[in-house]
């Protein structure tokens, strides 16, 4: 049995390709006909005027994704600017918030700018339990259930867990079309003759932006593989 | 293992590592399908698989659940994953810089 026959997860298989339908020829088209790749690459972005302008600002916003305190700080800034404590606004974010954000992103390309915010929730829990002694964090530690039960940030675990799967469902249509994989497009390197070449097509910009987000997502999953927790915890 | 919906009392909640491994292997499968369609031959996305293995081996929080998940769900189930797992280990694509590791020529 090969991995290519591996069935998708239940949640993943039910994901409808809202954001990227009919992009199965994406990689082929982009590599063989670079000049005509733009219209076929990400078809829904045919309403490109609006999406492109929004996406132009999105990568800048995505740079804040790597900062764990960014989502909480952003949410807090909307409510009370005086509060700089990242934990102050966390109870406002729930799993339903993440799910709603996922539905929004998958509903259409005009909501793609919500994706950085969805990815920010992946990093919500990275600061959790760093003060717990390492010997207590062993998978065989008898203290672990009590630590988890007493941990006030267990709701953040659920948010991060939901964000992981939500982001996967968002990326799934793009993975099926190959848009987020490395050899899919022939986008010019940034800065390499940028003054001579014309501005890249809107679809190329979207695809590059999407690949950045996907790279961040994969890197975050790899970080979670070496997380301090054993992988299973008992909730309360 | 039961994965009850969150919010129920006493539910087992898979948090970080095992779900991350599952999602990464789903991505490996999706990329392999795409590469196979491009090359019209069976291809495995070994680059990402090697990164996953490297992260697993270098992790300071390695544990039995994670190893069991990788072996039971993937290495012992999918022949190509098993092949590339041993291949990566043998040729040092994963652990070339680990202390004391001598790659096979």
Image (tube, rainbow, N blue to C red):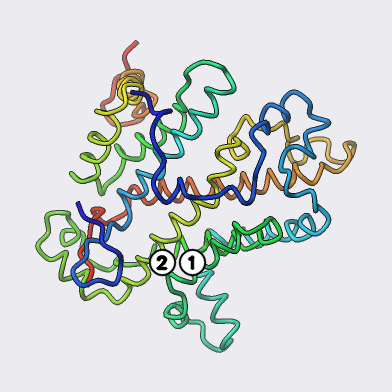
Q: Which residue is mark 1?
A: A98
Q: Are marks 1 and 2 in contact (CB under 8 Å)?
A: yes
Crowding near pointer 1: few (<14 within 10 Å), some, many (20+)? Answer: many
Q: Which residue is mark 2?
A: A159
Callout 1: chain: A
Q: What's the residue at 48%, 57% (across, down)?
A: A166
Check disc 1 and report its element: helix, strand or loop.
helix
* Residue found at the far top of this picture: B105
The picture places residue A217, in percent across and down from the top left corner, at 50, 50
> In this rendering, is residue A34 above or below A218?
above
What is the C-alpha distance between the residues marked 1 and 2? 7 Å
Q: Earlier in the sequence, mark 1 or mark 2?
A: 1
Callout 2: chain: A
The picture places residue B69, in percent across and down from the top left corner, at 25, 41
Residues A70 and B17: in front is: B17
Q: Indicate left or right for A7 with B76 as reference.
A: right
The picture places residue B54, in percent across and down from the top left corner, at 36, 35
> In this rendering, is residue A44 above or below A75?
above
Quadrant of the rendered image containing residue B9: bottom left
**The C terminus of chain A, quarter of image:** bottom left
The picture places residue B95, in percent across and down from the top left corner, at 34, 29
Give the label on residue B43, or none. none
**The N terminus of chain A, quarter of image:** top left
Check disc 2 and report its element: helix, strand or loop.
helix
Q: What's the residue at 24%, 28% (across, down)?
A: B76
Crowding near pointer 2: few (<14 within 10 Å), some, many (20+)? Answer: many
Q: What's the residue at 34%, 34% (across, down)?
A: B53
> In this rendering, is residue B16 above or below A36?
below
Residues A82 and A101: in front is: A101
Residues B36 and A113: in front is: B36
Quadrant of the rendered image containing residue A7: top left
Q: What's the residue at 55%, 66% (across, down)?
A: A101
């Amino acid at each position: 049995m090969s991995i290519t026959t591996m069935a998708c997860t239940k949640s993943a298989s039910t994901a409808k390709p809202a954001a990227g339908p009919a992009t199965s020829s994406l990689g082929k088209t982009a590599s063989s006909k670079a000049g005509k790749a733009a219209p076929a690459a990400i078809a829904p972005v045919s309403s490109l005027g609006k999406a492109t302008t929004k996406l132009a600002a999105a990568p800048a916003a995505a740079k804040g994704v790597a900062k764990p305190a960014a989502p909480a700080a952003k949410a807090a800034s909307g409510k009370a600017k005086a509060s700089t404590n990242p934990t102050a606004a966390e109870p406002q974010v729930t799993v339903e918030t993440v799910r709603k954000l996922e539905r929004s992103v998958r509903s259409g390309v005009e909501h793609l700018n919500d994706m950085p915010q969805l990815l920010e929730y992946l990093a919500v829990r990275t600061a959790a339990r760093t003060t717990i002694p390492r010997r207590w964090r062993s998978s065989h530690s008898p203290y672990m259930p009590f630590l988890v039960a007493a941990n006030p940030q267990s709701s953040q675990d659920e948010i991060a867990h939901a964000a992981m799967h939500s982001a996967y469902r968002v990326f799934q249509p793009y993975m099926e079309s190959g848009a987020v994989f490395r050899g899919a497009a022939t986008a010019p390197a940034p800065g390499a003759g940028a003054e001579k070449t014309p501005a890249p097509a809107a679809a190329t910009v979207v695809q590059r932006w999407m690949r950045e987000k996907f790279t961040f997502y994969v890197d975050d999953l790899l970080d979670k593989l070496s997380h301090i927790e054993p992988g299973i915890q008992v909730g309360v | 293992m039961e994965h009850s919906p969150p919010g129920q009392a006493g539910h087992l909640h898979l948090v970080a590592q095992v779900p991350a491994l599952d999602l990464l292997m789903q991505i490996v499968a999706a990329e392999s399908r795409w590469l196979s369609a491009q090359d019209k031959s069976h291809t495995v996305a070994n680059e990402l698989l090697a990164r996953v293995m490297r992260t697993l081996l270098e992790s300071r929080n390695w544990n039995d659940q994670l190893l069991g998940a990788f072996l039971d769900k993937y290495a012992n189930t999918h022949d190509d994953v098993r092949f590339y797992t041993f291949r990566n280990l043998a040729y040092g694509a994963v652990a070339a810089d680990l202390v004391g590791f001598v790659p096979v020529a």
